[in-house]
Image (cartoon, helix red, strand yellow):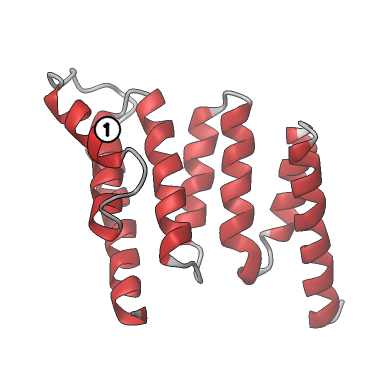
Amino acid sequence: MESSELVVATAERYERGLALKNAGLYKSAIEQFEQAAIDPALALKAHAHIGLCFKLTGRYEDAVTAFRKALTASAGSSKETVQILYVLGRTLESLGRMAETLEAYRWIRREDPGYRDVADRIAQLSSRRPAPTSKMSPPAETSWISDVLKSWQDRLRTSK
């Protein structure tokens, strides 16, 4: 398959994925988005939609993985990054992974201080007593988020 045919094929897969997701056919949508993610130009959006599909079906851990893949995909605007970080933060919050949640929200606040309800969420989460460390949030996870978010901040600074 030639490069131009691959772009058309992946773009069609992405569009099919959107239609399937909107119809509530999440498993089929994920399959289409996975094929679309082969194209670097669509990887960020495709992985973000995969994450949304997983989240909508209650598969939060899989959603976190997909959102992380979206954040590591190249070529994303500051707006897209903030949106993905917000959904990642909400998903992590649902899982009770507060340290990671706070880190994601704080990065959003640095990039877009007035974004949605981030300031309120940070205040609310910061005022809670720290929960005992769970098996689901090892320090390496928080470090991973920090590294990815720092690379995005560096990219955003150089693109302004």
- Using the rendered view, name the quadrant where residue 66 is placed: top right
- Determine whether, in the image, residue 95 is placed left or right of residue 24: left
From what the image shows, is residue 157 above or below residue 13? below
Residue 123 location in percent, x, y? 17, 32
- Determine whether, in the image, residue 48 is placed left or right of residue 113: right
Residue 24 location in percent, x, y? 76, 31
Residue 68 location in percent, x, y? 45, 49
Question: What residue is shown with label 1?
Answer: 121
Q: Look at 34% across and 58% down and name the residue there.
A: 148
From what the image shows, is residue 75 above or below residue 21? below
Q: Look at 60% across and 57% down and name the residue there.
A: 45
Q: Could one spot residue 25 in this view of the protein?
A: yes
Q: Could one spot residue 140 in this view of the protein?
A: no
Residue 31 location in percent, x, y? 76, 45
Nearer the observer, 28 or 136: 28
Q: Secondary structure at mark 1?
A: helix
Quadrant where the C terminus sits is bottom left
Nearer the observer, 121 or 129: 121
Q: Look at 51% across and 55% down and name the residue there.
A: 70
- Determine whether, in the image, residue 53 is placed left or right of residue 112: right
Sort mark 1 into few (<14), some (14-19) or many (20+) by Cα contacts within 10 Å: some
From what the image shows, is residue 88 above or below residue 153? above
Q: Look at 39% across and 24% down and name the residue there.
A: 95
Quadrant where the N terminus sits is bottom right
User: How many numbered marks, from 0 up?
Assistant: 1
- Determine whether, in the image, residue 109 is placed left or right of residue 20: left
Query: At label 1, which amino acid type do we have?
Result: Arg
- Using the rendered view, name the quadrant where residue 20 is placed: top right
From what the image shows, is residue 142 above or below residue 9? above
